[in-house]
Amino acid sequence: MSTRQNITALIALLFVPLMMLTFVAAAQEKTQRAKARKSKKAQTSPQPILPDGETILASMYTVHRGVLKMTVIMDFESEKLGGDVTLEVKKKGKWLSVGKSPIIVDGYSTHFRVNKWDHSQDTLYCVLHGKSTWQGTIRRDPTDKETIVIAGFTGNAGGNNKEDIVKHVGYINPDLLVFTGDQVYGNDHRRNFPNNFCMPFRTLLRDIPSILLPDDHDVGQGNLWGDAGENYSNADYTRMVQRVQVGHLPDPYDPTPVGQGIGVYYTSLNIGRVSVAIIEDRKFKSDYTRFFPKGNLVGAEDRGFSPDKADPPGAVLLGERQHKFLRDWAGDWRSTDMKLVVSQTIPANASTHIGRGRKHVRADYDTNGWPRSGRDAALREIRRAFAPILCGDQHLATLVQHGVEQWNDSAYSLCVPSIQNYWPRYWEPDKSGANHINGLPPYTGEYLDGFGNKITVWAAANPGPTGREPAKLHDKAPGYGIVRMNCRTRKITMECWPRYADPADPGTGSQYPGWPKTIDQEDNYRRKAVAWLPTIQVEGMANPVIQVIDEPSGEMVYTIRAMSNTWRPKVFREGSYTLKVGEPDTDQMKTLKSIQSVPSESRKRIKVSF
């Protein structure tokens, strides 16, 4: 054999094993990739959450004017088991079935409605499916309770480790839970909703009535300007999310769907003698890109920006449908002493810097500071009811009084902090606002926000070092808000709690700086009086409802329940007014027409007898 042949044979001997090793390695890599894909699929596909045999994750309910509505969230394994879900209640020592309902697999929920509900007493209930049971209490309506307590949450990002916040809120024992949006981050609602929301809060939701407002992240969109339903990227998905999150709310004021057949849920709910308006600011808000295609944030360096140019004709916030609802709600004081509005976010641009790099921005179209005219129109309706606003979304907790014609002539808002904050915002203006109060932080006072809205900032829970671990959680100012509404004194106390502070143990920490703050009910409509009507003195009735109507226009100026049998209405122009006085619960109402305004020093009285 020649030398060349020997070399060729040697190469062949070396090459064949090398090729075999290459083929083996490729096969192994292919197998590993397949395993990785399978593992990833397993991680992103719905997985059972409860132990074998258990299928009921959580329940949420409300009772309003004699109607119980309940949503039950099911585990994914319930689809395999099938069958209806049963709701039983305990009456006179016996369990009675009050309804059966199928599982809606798209969202894994089932829904119950019970009419003619006796809301005068606590009622034990039990949800049954297969061998799984879930028991709780439908609380009685606390109409005799002096102070109604509402807990507010937003931004439920990051896993299901919420034991601290559940414990602390459980100690406070609120009468109502309000989740203002972003209960779920990510677009896989079937997986994330139970893991990130239902399971951590299930023990609170089981026994306490609740409100949930879907916001942008809940429907899988990073930001949302709903444009009356037209700007939702996935209408089917949105309908599923709404069914799961708001299916237990009282019936909507006007159920007519918006664009793409997406339903609405704006409505009201009575808790004790507090009436809560639930509005949908995101769904009806105009898409700002139709007017300003350059982007969501206006930086401080954008010198060409003008707040007046940023308020174009035709831009909508709540829209006329919700204005009508708020007007009717503001005039309806049946079984009501005080009122509260629940909204997804604050009617102002109450942040100056955003993100980990603290980018300085002038205006953010994602806030309800835009559009300014729509924001002003909403506040004019809300203040007719002397109602504060509970809201969220901004990640930054703030306490603000809003102004329309003048500073401080409209509602206070408590924007609650995120439960867990991944995207920090800050309120760090260059200088103190006008009429700054000595002793308060330098960032407080009267300001014009980036859109030219009048706001008075009383408090802001800016992120910063706390020395508490984990720092990634606590340094971003997470927590929750509390509103206490005293129906006897008509005082409203707003609180803002860090997650690390245990209300049962003052040694663990206190509320964020600036909180708590207590205001009077009438502070939510502090518009300066131009004139006054005579003092109304009611005989034969305590705490009457008084409604003021402008006679030339027929427009309701405002409605309130007086704290005694005398009350003096203020008005905002000289002239003639109609007054409706009495008790709407008993239809004992009297109408007084052509009541002329008088100067502030007048002592004129009008007696109304029942």
Image (cartoon, rainbow, N blue to C red):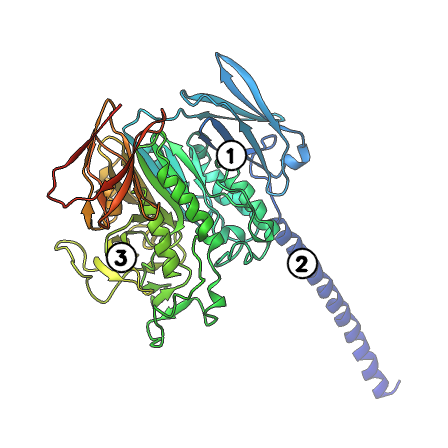
User: Which-is-in-front pick, marks 1 and 2?
Assistant: 1
Outermost bottom residue? 3
Q: Looking at the image, which is closer to me, 512 or 377?
A: 377
Which residue position holds label 2? 32
What's the residue type where badge 2 is placed? Answer: Gln
Please tell me whether mark 2 sits on a helix, a strand or a loop.
helix
Q: Are marks 2 and 3 in contact (CB under 8 Å)?
A: no
Please tell me whether mark 3 sits on a helix, a strand or a loop.
loop
User: Tag 2 or tag 1, which sits nearer the N-term?
Assistant: 2
Disc 3 packing (10 Å; few <14; some 14–19; many ≥20): some
Residue 102 x %, y %: 64, 32
Q: Quadrant of the C terminus?
A: top left
User: Tag 3 or tag 2, which sits nearer the N-term?
Assistant: 2
Residue 312 x %, y %: 41, 66
What's the residue type where badge 1 is placed? Answer: Ala
What's the residue type where badge 3 is placed? Answer: Glu
User: Which-is-in-front pick, marks 2 and 3?
Assistant: 3
Q: Quadrant of residue 605?
A: top left
Which residue position holds label 1? 58
Residue 568 x %, y %: 19, 38
Q: CA distance from mark 2 to mark 3?
A: 67 Å
Q: Looking at the image, which is closer to me, 355 or 31?
A: 355
Whether 364 is drawn above or below 551: the answer is below
Which residue position holds label 3? 405
User: Tag 1 or tag 3, which sits nearer the N-term?
Assistant: 1
Residue located 33% across and 66% down the image: 358
Q: Looking at the image, which is closer to me, 362 or 594?
A: 594
Disc 2 packing (10 Å; few <14; some 14–19; many ≥20): few
Q: Can residue 478 be seen?
A: no
Q: CA distance from mark 1 to mark 2?
A: 38 Å
